[in-house]
Amino acid sequence: MSERAAPFYCPYCGDEDLRPSEQGHGAWECAACNRAFQLKFLGLLARGLQQTDAGGDKI
């Protein structure tokens, strides 16, 4: 089993000074803008990937 993914930057200010929060699973704190946020995986989309005419994948 692999480690859980961590965010690379704050979604609000873009800074990389992030620390895990004590608020619970998936919660992070940004030291630069003093904001806290939580990441949550919602699930897979039912439609999945669809082929385009150019041969690439369309989401």
Image (tube, grey):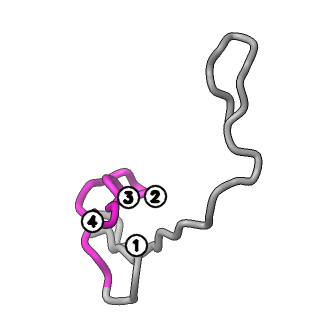
Q: What's the magenta region?
A: 1-21
Secondary structure at badge 4 equals loop
Of the residues under marks 3 and 4, which one precedes in the sequence?
4
Which dot, 1 or 3, sits closer to the camera?
Answer: 3
Mark 1 touches mark 3? (CB < 8 Å): yes
In the visual, does 11 lie left or right of 5?
A: right
Where is residue 31? Give x, y as percent.
26, 69
- Per the rendering, the mark at residue 12 is 2
Amino acid type indicated by mark 3: Cys
Mark 3 touches mark 4? (CB < 8 Å): no
Q: Is residue 51 above or below residue 21?
A: above
- Quarter occupied by the C terminus: top right
Q: Kindly give the residue lying farthest to the top in the view shown.
A: 54
Mark 3 touches mark 2? (CB < 8 Å): yes
* Residue identified by numbered label 1: 35
Which dot, 3 or 4, sits closer to the camera?
Answer: 4
Of the pair 49 and 17, the residue shown nearer to us: 49
Cα distance in 3D space between marks 1 and 4: 24 Å
Cα distance in 3D space between marks 1 and 3: 9 Å
Dot 4 alpha-carbon crowd within 10 angstroms: few under 14, some 14 to 19, many 20 or more? few
* Residue identified by numbered label 4: 3
